[in-house]
Image (spheres, coloured by chain):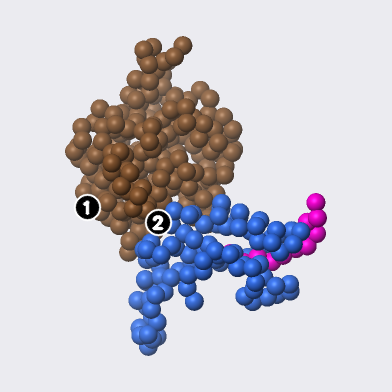
Chain colours: A blue, B brown
Amino acid sequence: MGASERFSVRVEVHLREGIADPQGATIERALPALGLTGVTAVRAGKSFRFDVAAADEADALAQATVVADRLLANPVIEESSVTVLPAGVGSAGVGSAGVGSTA
Amino acid sequence: MATRVGVVNFPGTNCEHDAILAVQRMGASAELVWHGDTSVAGYDALILPGGFAHGDYLRPGAIARFSPVMEAVSRFAADGGPVVGVCNGFQVLTEAGLLPGALQKNRGLRFLCTTVDLRVETSDSVITAGVAVGTGLSIPINHFEGNYTCDAATLAMLRAEERVVLRYVDNPNGSIDDIAGVCNESRNVVGLMPHPERASDPLLGSVDGTVLIGALLRSVEGAMTPTATVA
């Protein structure tokens, strides 16, 4: 096995479109107190970071997708997006899979 | 031989002793089954009680689904054994895929601890066998994630197959179609958010929970009669 490299992965989990998001709605209702009235469509979600030992980026993405699909997200109500981050401390990266919903 | 009920105890479960006491008071025996156990042999029925299994980390039931005992629970259910998930136990059963749908945060983001009125919607489940449709029950709820949801196709199936076991009379949490409890296709696995064990003694304000626990015990006894058992 050639799982020689470590890849940093980020998984974001959001409620599916059409599933009520009471957290997002509550955050949105708080915004006018900041004087902001133009911020809409707030959706709350979760973000996970972890490292994967993998042969290459595609392998890392595949493994992380298993983690996302089988544990981090409940497919009945949630969807996930998996991103393999660039080497080093990266921001947004390449290899995005799935559908990211907001912002 | 007395009916033996196994009460599955995850780290963070907190209603296990209430469930045991409620079952014992109705003449059956009940004991704890540790989540690390890999067998549920010898039990006639299983209860997954309420609480916060594995701290409810990630999502309620998301980690509990991977506890070693869950494979045994799944096999027990597949063999027709009665399995009842109460509150957190309901959440565990949906996460484990033994029941359809999911339980999300209550509408209004309020933790709800109150007594609710329920309506029995089918007599064909292990907790409502012999209980007339339309029977009213007053039983406590105690949850933050009790808002039952599922996609439109699943809801249509649940309705068509009459698998909604209990409905709220006055929906407290936003559950789709007022659903308080559902069963699987074989009707031996039931999940419900209300806590029957907390309505099992006059001191607790209601004994309506004994209607459901009694039905569960009768279901087991029915299944154990010689005519229904393959030798």
- B8 vs B165, left or right, is right
Q: Chain of mark 2?
A: B
- B44 vs B116, left or right, is right
- A62 vs B144, left or right, is right
Q: Nearer the viewer, mark 2 or mark 1?
A: 2
Q: Is residue B84 above or below residue A71?
A: above
In magenta stretch: residue A5: yes
Name the residue rendered at 30%, 53% in the picture.
Answer: B176
**Element class at badge 1:** loop
**Element class at badge 2:** strand
Residue hosting label 2: B104
Query: Which mark is drawn over residue B170?
Result: 1
**In the rendered structure, which disc, 2 or 1, sits on the residue that comes first in sequence?**
2
Q: Are marks 2 and 1 on the same chain?
A: yes
Seen as rendered, the residue at the extreme bottom is A35
Label 2 CA crowd tier, 10 Å (few <14, some 14–19, many 20+): many
The answer to whether residue B92 is seen in the rendering is no
The quadrant the N terminus of chain B occupies is top left
Between residues B216 and B178, which one lies in front from this camera angle?
B178
**Where's residue A84, x and y in %?**
66, 67
The Cα atoms of the two marked residues, 2 and 1, are separated by 18 Å
**Where's residue A38, x and y in %?**
37, 85
Q: Chain of mark 1?
A: B
The kind of residue on which mark 2 rests is Gln
**Where's residue B24, x and y in %?**
38, 28
Between residues A96 and A24, which one lies in front from this camera angle?
A96
The magenta segment is A1-11
Name the residue rendered at 30%, 38% in the picture.
Answer: B161
